[in-house]
Structures are given as C-alpha cells and as structure tokens.
Image: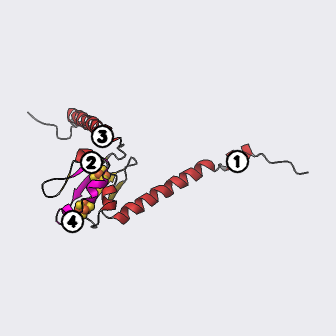
Amino acid sequence: MPQNKGAIDIFGLLSEDTVDSEKKKNREALLAPTGVKDFFQEGKISINSYTCLGVQCKECVKVCPTNALYWGSGKVEIVEDLCVYCGACVLNCQVDDCIKLERKRDDGKVEKFSKPKDVLLLQKKANTNKRVQRVRSVILKPQDYYIQYPKTKQK
Ligand code: SF4
Ligand code: SF4
C-alpha cells in the first residue's frame, strides 16, 4: 500500500500526549508525600561514579529533598522520577562536574550546570530578576503617573 511520507501521524501524537500526561500524574503522585513542587517542565541528571567520592561522602543523598538519590550497589543511584532538578545535590557536591544537571524552565530556556558556583550564579540571577520585576510592578508608567498626580496649578 502506498504511504504518504509527508503525512503527520495524528494518532501517534495523541498517544504521545497521553503517555506524557500519564507520566506527569505518576510523578505528582510520587512527589505528593514529599511536599516538594515540580518547578521545571523536564530535565536530566547524571552522576559520574568514577569521580564521585563515594560512601565516605554521600552529601548529595543527605540534601536531596525528594529522596531521589540513594546509596545503592556501591554508588549513588538516582530515581529519575523523583528528581525535581532543584540543584541542591550539585550545590553540595565536593567534586566539580561530578553531578550534571540540565533543566527546562517554563519559558523554554534550558539551564545546564555541574558546579556549586553555577547554582549560586543561577540563584543570584533569579533573585535579581525577581527584584527587578517587583520594582517594575510598583513604578508607575508615565501615563499612569499623570492620572494619579495631575499637574497642580501654579499660584
Ligand atoms: S536535583 Fe539533586 S537534590 Fe534536587 S531533587 Fe534532583 S537529585 Fe535531588
Ligand atoms: S556529593 Fe558528589 S562526591 Fe559526594 S557522594 Fe554525592 S556525587 Fe559523590
């Protein structure tokens, strides 16, 4: 039977959406007991078991708010479905580039980081953006300023 190569597989797309929403629901159910919200649309995390300090460290396991990390068979293991890509593990890891994180924000921007200083820089940037937005929200636009403070007549 001849196939139309340019045709879009609508049913394929629909089933992909269904899988995604199923995944999202499962994630929400898994995260509910931790009380931690999922802020990022998607992400990736990996740990280099060759550079990891191993059993004497486990700092990342201790700080993970969702228990996505655990000490498994001789190395730190990840339960990807529980990771919210918060970066706490990277911030506390003593080895640069040992934990690699990639996350997609709501505005579509992708952030990649693997060192504590990267996390601090991102936090600083986020705080600065919040401050700028707060200042913008209280500063009146010129047209609004003239409505609120009409020109007073000179005596
Ligand atoms: S980014 Fe790290 S600390 Fe945060 S949830 Fe994922 S594994 Fe845990
Ligand atoms: S904090 Fe870093 S070095 Fe320590 S156990 Fe975790 S991945 Fe390994």
Alpha carbons under labels 4 and 2: distance apart: 19 Å
**What segment carries the magenta color?**
43-70
Nearest the eye: 76 or 27: 76
Q: Which residue is mark 3?
A: 31
Point out the quarter of the image occupied by ligand 2: bottom left
Q: The residue under label 4 is which amino acid type?
A: Leu
Q: Which residue is mark 4?
A: 53
Q: Of the two numbered discs 1 and 4 on the same chain, state the one appearing first in sequence.
A: 4
Q: Are marks 3 and 2 in contact (CB under 8 Å)?
A: no
Q: Position of residue 42 (x, y in %)?
A: 30, 47
Task: Specify few, some or many for label 4: CA neighbours under 10 Å numbering under 14, 14-19, or 20 or more.
Answer: some
Q: Name the residue rendered at 32%, 41% in the picture.
A: 34
Number of the front mark, 1 or 4: 4
What numbered label is drawn on residue 118? Answer: none
Number of the front mark, 1 or 3: 3
Q: Of the two numbered discs 3 and 2 on the same chain, state the one appearing first in sequence.
A: 3
Task: Specify few, some or many for label 2: CA neighbours under 10 Å numbering under 14, 14-19, or 20 or more.
Answer: some
> Residue 29, relative to residue 84: is it above or below?
above
Q: Are marks 1 and 3 in contact (CB under 8 Å)?
A: no
Asked which secondary structure carries label 1, the reply is helix
